[in-house]
Amino acid sequence: MTIIDVHNFFQEQKGLGPGAAVQPTASEIKQGFTTITSNPDPLPKLFQPLNIRGLTLKNRAVVSPMCMYSGTDGFANDFHLAHIGQYALRGLGLIIMEATGVVPEGRISPNCLGLWKDEHIEKLTQIVNLAHANKAAIGIQLAHAGRKSSTTALWLIKERGSNADAQNGGWPDNVVGPSAVPYNNGSWTPKELSIGEIKNIQQSFADAAVRADKAGFDVVELHGAHGYLLHEFLSPISNKRTDEYGGSFENRARMVVETARAVRKVWPKEKPLFVRLSITDWVEPSDEVPTGGWTEEESIELAKLLVKEGVDLIDCSTSGSSPKQQIPLSPGYQIPFATAIKKNVPGILSGAVGLITEAKQANDAVEGGKADLVFLGRVLLRNPNFVLDAATQLGVFPQYPHQYERGRNKSTLTFV
C-alpha cells in the first residue's frame, strides 16, 4: 500500500498499525494497560495476518460495505472521510466502501456513491490515503442496482415514500433489469436490457475498476447479491430471458462471469478481486420457480467458474430477490454458506457476514476453518472499537492508534 499524499491533519501510524497484535512492553504492563505479559502463540485466528495476492491484511476483520446515502451526484464528501477514517483508526484489517454505482442509474438511491467519471476519483483518493496512513487496507464495492435502483434514502422513506421519483432526483424511466419484472407491486417496473446494453454495463464495471485503481484502492468487490443487477441475472425470480443470458444455469451465470472477466482484465494482477453473492434466495419452491430461486448448489458452481476468472474471495451473504423470502435469522446464520463455498471450491477464499456481533463468535468463524475473513456491519455502527475490544477479550494485546494510546482500558489506576 502506497500513501500518495499524507495530509497534515494526521500522522502515519507505526508498524503494522492499529488492530495488529503486538507484544506489550514492560512499561505498558506496569501502567496497567494489560494483564498479559505476551500474546498467545499461536494468535487467535481473527488476529492472524492473511495474504491475498500482493496484499497482506493485518487481521481478518473487515468492514462490510454499508450504504450511507450521503453523496451528491455520486461524489464522496467529508462525511465519508470521517466515516471510513474511524474504522482505519480503530483497527479493521480491511475496509470496503459502500455499493458504488458504475453508472448514474446504477445507484440504489440518488444519494449513493458513484465511480462513473474521473471527477469522482479525487475525494476517494483522499479517503484511501487516510486509510493507508493508518495501515488499513481499503476496497470499494462496485455495483449496479438494476430493478431496485431509484429508491429513497432510508431516513427519507416516511417523508417521500420508498421510490425516488424524478422530482426527488430519481430516474423511474431509466430503471433496468434482465427482464421487465418489478421487485414488488410498489416498485418501478424495469426495462429489459438489450444485449448491447448488457455489454455497455459490463464495460462500465471495468471502467470503474480502472478508476478505483487510480484512486489507490487495494481491493475491488463486485456486488452480486441482495437482489441487485448481477444477482437479478442469476435468479430465475427476476430473470425470465430466453436468450444467452437467461434460462439455464450457464446462461443466468453469464452476466456475472463476463463482468468478473472484464474487471479482472483491467484490475492489477497483484490486487485481490472479491465478489459478494447471495448464496440463496430463501424462497420456497413454486410452480413458477420450481427451485424457489437462486440456490446454494448454484452458488457453489458459480464460485467454481469465478475462481477460473481470477476471483479471490466470495463474500457470502443471502437473500434480496423477493419479498417472499423467509430468512431464518439467528446469530451467524450465514456462516454455513461461507463454509460451503470454502469446502467445495478449491482455490477460493470465503467471507462470512451476517449477525456476527461478538468477539468469540467472530474468531470461531475463522478459527474453525469456516471462513477466511469476517465481514462486520451494523455492529461497527454501534461500536467502531469492536476490533480493539475483541483483541482484549481474546487475550491479545493490540496496537492502538498512537493518538489514542492513553485511552486504553487499565487494570490498575495510574496517572499515566
Image (tube, rainbow, N blue to C red):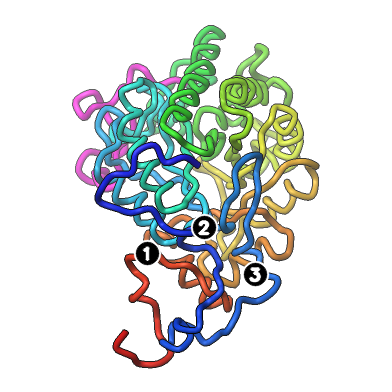
- The answer to whether any part of residue 317 appears in the image is yes
Q: Amino acid at mark 1?
A: Arg
**Which residue is outermost to the top?**
196
Sooner in the amino-acid sequence: mark 3 or mark 1: 3
Residue bounds of the magenta highlight: 150-176
The answer to whether 285 appears left or right of 357 in the picture is right
Q: What residue does disc 2 label?
A: 16
Q: Label 1's element? A: helix
- Residue 154 on the magenta span: yes
In this rendering, the label closer to the viewer, 2 or 3: 2
Q: Residue at x 50, y 42 (%)?
A: 1
Cα separation, mark 2 vs mark 1, equals 25 Å
Crowd tier of the residue under label 2, counting other residues whose Cα lies within 10 Å: few below 14, some 14–19, many 20 or above: some
- Residue 133 on the magenta span: no
Q: Label 3's element? A: loop
Q: Is 140 drawn above or below residue 37 in the view shown?
A: above
Q: Is 192 drawn above or below residue 144 in the view shown?
A: above
Crowd tier of the residue under label 3, counting other residues whose Cα lies within 10 Å: few below 14, some 14–19, many 20 or above: many
The answer to whether 323 appears left or right of 68 in the picture is right
Q: Nearer the viewer, residue 415 or 90?
A: 415
